[in-house]
Image (tube, rainbow, N blue to C red):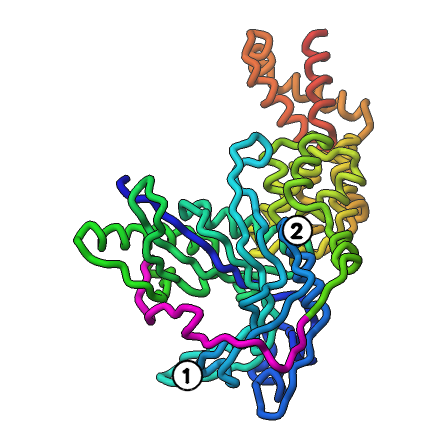
Amino acid sequence: MKYETVCGLEIHTELLTKTKIFCSCSTAFGGEANTQCCEICTGMPGTLPSLNKKVCEFAVRTGAALHCEINRYTKFDRKNYFYPDLPKAYQISQLYIPICQNGYVEIGDSIKGGKKRVRIHEIHMEEDAGKLIHKDDKTLINFNRCGVPLLEIVTEPDISTGEEAAEFTQKLRDILRFCGVSDCKMQEGSLRADVNVSVRPKGSDTLGTRTEMKNINSFKAIKNAVLHEAKRQISVLECGGEIIQQTRRWDDRENTSYPMRIKENAPHYKYFPEPDIPPLTFSEEYIESVRATLPELPDEKKLRYITKLGLTEYDADIICSDLAFIKLFEKTAELTNSPKESANWIMGEVMRMLSVTQTLPENMNFRAESLGEIINLLSAGKITRSTAKETFEQVFVNGVDPSEYIKQNGLELQNNSDEILAVVRSVISANPKAVDEYLGGKQKAIGFLIGQAMKQLGGKASPNEVSDCIKNEIKT
């Protein structure tokens, strides 16, 4: 408790453009190695970059969503370093005048208060490097990722715990996905974090020496990396040692980090203005036209769901955790006119089937109209809840039409009161002990009678109607 943790993040997100930042090669993930690269993105001599306009638009949109100042004048710079997966030995990035600066993201409880503002130092555009594949004592290089457009979002050192670091990254991911600038698929590397950590005596204003852990791609790993590195640094200091500014590799399986190299500073990269791309100037009209494309952002949507649609804060958090849930919820709630019931089905049966089938939310392929139809049939008393769940499972797995499935399998509830009455009288007659127990005050006994009647009716009657019928018969 003598020390406090100070953390800043550098988030790299690949943009959802069809082509790369400086050439026309595809950015599609998963292509055969070295089939989505050309002379420009592999840095062949005599080639010239041509800036993708969509990258600028996405950068401005992101800056607007993160409350940033958008620089009307910006330019690119060369960052010089050599790695095997960066064949031209420099990266086109932005150092001196990034496109966005001085923004923020609020974390914490945005509904009840207790919010904390994490400042955004800057957002800059740059190109991605390729990928090294280590296999059988050999290192292979895939250049497909070279030139994929990136935004690097750099925070101020405002984060104090691993939990805050993970929450910030998740909040940022949600905003980026809502804005449509990135799919943020961490498992594919389209969102990854460099985590900078230092410690200092509690109450001090002086920053300690920081270390950086590169390319962490899960919220859990981000949290654990901050926690582990802070403990490691405190242990070093307590033993009289000195923290070395270095880059470290985080091993998520071992839950530990290892030194890789001494951490470089800006002078080591020998930055200079990119000579092949002219400076960019954005008009106020252009910036405002991009700002106008911003959708309803996560905090605004959650607040509307709670105040206008009657969801709980927990419900709203779950629904807003994924764009696929939001789209499904809003369409289903429109069809059913019951936001709460629609949310319950998504948090219940939809998530259960996602878990059972190991399906990601974005890969759901059933129609929202089908879920809405099932909820409406249940609300109208035309099917039982068990039938509704069975039907939805078939909708999720096989894409069946709910009404057709219910009809073909004879699952509609019976509206024949005479048949229900006849079955109820038969059950009462056959189970006098249960009847006496119910009349004696044992409320559970009626559940047995309802179950027997439902069994004889093949589940094709409303349990409520059966219950009412039993009670009326016993009273008479």
Residue type of the residue flagged with mark 1: Thr
Task: Tell me where residue 339 appears, x and y as whole percent.
Answer: 72, 35
Q: Is residue 415 visible?
A: yes
Instruction: Indicate whether 368 appears above or below 72.
Output: above
* Position of the C terminus by quadrant: top right
Tell me if label 2 and label 1 are in contact, CB under 8 Å: no
135 and 433: which is toward the camera:
135
- Check if residue 264 falls in the magenta segment: yes
Q: Secondary structure at mark 1?
A: strand
Q: Quadrant of residue 163?
A: top left
- Residue plotted at (44% across, 54% down): 8
5 and 30: which is toward the camera:
5
Residue type of the residue flagged with mark 2: Ala
Task: Tell me where residue 130 appears, x and y as whole percent.
Answer: 52, 78
Give left or right: position of 440 versus 242.
Answer: right
Label of residue 65 in the image: 2
Q: Residues within 10 Å of mark 1 (few under 14, many from 20)?
A: few
Instruction: Indicate whether 119 appears above or below 448.
Output: below
User: Which residue in the protein does label 1 denote?
Assistant: 139
Instruction: Indicate whether 232 appears above or below 13.
Output: above
- Residue plotted at (41% across, 57% down): 196
Task: State the extent of the magenta-drawn residues as a range.
Answer: 255-279
- Residue plotted at (41% across, 45% down): 160
Task: Tell me where residue 107 appears, x and y as whole percent.
Answer: 53, 42
